[in-house]
Amino acid sequence: MNSRSAIAFAGGVGAAALTAIITNVIRTAPSLQRTNHTGEQVSLSEGIGAATALIGSAVARRDFAAATALATTANAGLVDDIEDLREEAPKAKGLAGHFQALKRGELTTGAVKVAAIGSSAAGYALVHCERYDRGFYDWVIDSIIVAGSANIANLFDLRPGRALKACVACSLVASTGRVSPRSFGATLGTIAGSAPTDLAGKTMLGDVGANALGLQVGMLAIVPSSRTFRTGMAALTLGVIAAGEVLSFSKFIESSKVLSALDELGVKTK
């Protein structure tokens, strides 16, 4: 094992342990309980554990731009999670729903979250572009990738393990570039620490965890130097978000035997 692999492994073990510990310690807290798609109670503790591990890892490697972006995104997601737990009228859903609410003069927690994610992604991308001497176009596409990834992870957090599997796949694609081994290790470690209770249908990422983990994956994806690669990623990101506004990913996945099999892989709720 070379030094880069050792660093990635150590970071992954630490992130996995922290995620798992926090997830299980606070799992039974009444304020974190939520009803899933089958009507069963699940805990949002996983999301808090995942976000904490990712932020802690960023601080440990002195990447304070990433830590700030992750903390801002996670906190905005937590506020939205708490609002969703309140028994009131149906909340606005999707980007279109939040923008429609704004047109009516209503400021939703979802709209606040969108603004927080967008500003966090733009801020991180600016620091990243300065670090790698990139221009305005690069800043735009990098911002789209980071912010969009946070949104997409949340769209996939509707079934056990689905968001985690999507983040693993995207992280592996990003790893073909010059990613930080500690950042990559922390990402996979956080996913590993989240997986046992997520796949068992006992916990879920929620907005707090899905947005933070998606943001982390997006930050990995913008490291590869190829502008062509990042342009394609930005276009794909926008396409997935647009598709999510008009169709159900769950129904789309269920309509495909291959995707359905992957979706159910490792799930232990049945």
Image: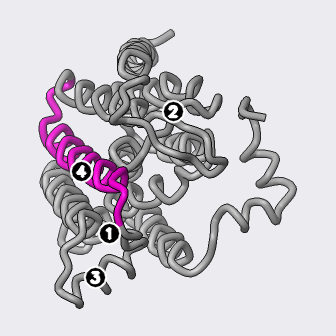
**Is 54 a magenta residue?**
no
Front disc: 2 or 1:
2
Q: Could you tell me how far apart the alpha carbons at marks 3 and 2 are, in whole angstroms?
A: 30 Å
Residue annotated with mark 1: 141
Q: Is residue 265 found left or right of 70 in the rendered image?
A: right
Q: Is residue 21 above or below residue 146?
A: above
Is tag 1's residue or tag 3's residue first in the polypeptide sequence?
3
Q: Is residue 203 left or right of residue 105?
A: right
| CA gap, disc 4 and disc 2 | 18 Å
On the image, numbered disc 2 is attached to which residue? 203
Contact between labelled residues 2 and 3, with CB atoms less than 8 Å apart: no
Q: Mark 4: which secondary structure?
A: helix
Q: Do the residues labelled 4 and 3 touch (CB within 8 Å)?
A: no
Q: Residue at (42%, 24%) from the top-left corner?
A: 27
Name above or below for residue 71 compared with residue 189. Answer: below
In primary-sequence order, the first of circles 2 and 1 is 1
Secondary-structure class at tag 1: helix
Q: Please indicate, yes or no, whether residue 6 appears anywhere in the rendered image.
A: yes
Residue 101, numbered circle: 3
The residue where tag 4 is placed is 79
Name the residue located 19 percent from the left edge and 41 percent from the top edge: 71
- Mark closest to the chain's N terminus, 4 or 3: 4
